[in-house]
Amino acid sequence: MKDLVERNRCPWCLGSELYREYHDREWGVPVRDDRLLFEFLILEGAQAGLSWSTILQRRESYRAAFDNFDAAKVARYGALEKRKLLANPGIIRNRLKVEAAVANAQAFLAVQKEFGSFSDYLWQFINHAPLVNRWTNLRQVPTETAESKAMSRDLKKRGFRFVGPTICYAFMQAVGMVNDHVLECFRHPENLADKAKGQGRKQGTRFTRSRLRRIR
């Protein structure tokens, strides 16, 4: 509890413990695992018009309802599976979003086949390296960027739905393609690097990139 109170965090996550845990463990951490990328893609689409806390509260229900986000299984969902999803109180029962999840699974598999992995396809939009920003307050954080617009355009061409530039940017933040932790937040890479260096000096060890990755 002391840690939760004393650490500096991005202001947006201070409203609930669920938000804080997501912020501390996941938000802004680079994701290159295709299954997890697919999960975030579906969850970000489900969020459209809603708060992220609404989706986080239902995350486990989404995993159960969508076969742990196995894209190959979701892509085969037919009328029966869609009816079950629309009757499931644990998820957002919106017909367009359910239809989009299935269509996105099919498009996801097509991208995997073309590029070898969905990760390789996505990360090309930022030259395969996270974009680390240095915002001092949340008002500076954009809702969309040139990169998210380019990603949105290409995803739409490939048949993806609920992938507008704003949704794409939120997705990029979530999977660590963009790091938008404010400068005073303990999760900003500069603060993580300082912490790692301090631990290295204390233990008499040399700071390395691999050590930083382990601490993150």
Image: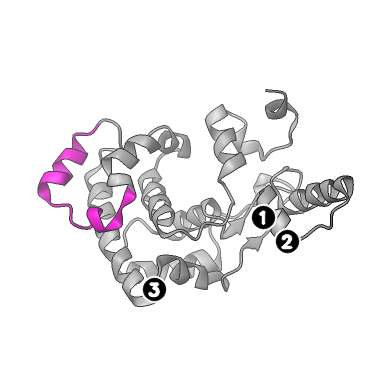
Residue 60 x %, y %: 37, 36
Q: Are marks 2 and 1 in contact (CB under 8 Å)?
A: yes
Q: Which residues are magenta?
A: 69-88
Q: Are marks 3 and 2 in contact (CB under 8 Å)?
A: no
Determine which residue is flagged by label 3.
116
Q: CA distance from mark 3 to mark 1?
A: 25 Å
Residue 16 visible (yes or no): no
Q: Secondary structure at mark 2?
A: helix
Most extreme residue toward the left, as rendered? 80
92 is within the stretch colored magenta: no
- Chain-order first, disc 3 or disc 2: 3
Amino acid carrying label 1: it is Arg
173 or 73, which lies in front? 73
Local packing at callout 3 (Cα closer than 10 Å; few below 14, some 14-19, many 20+) is few
- Chain-order first, disc 3 or disc 1: 3
Determine which residue is flagged by label 2.
209
Determine which residue is flagged by label 1.
213
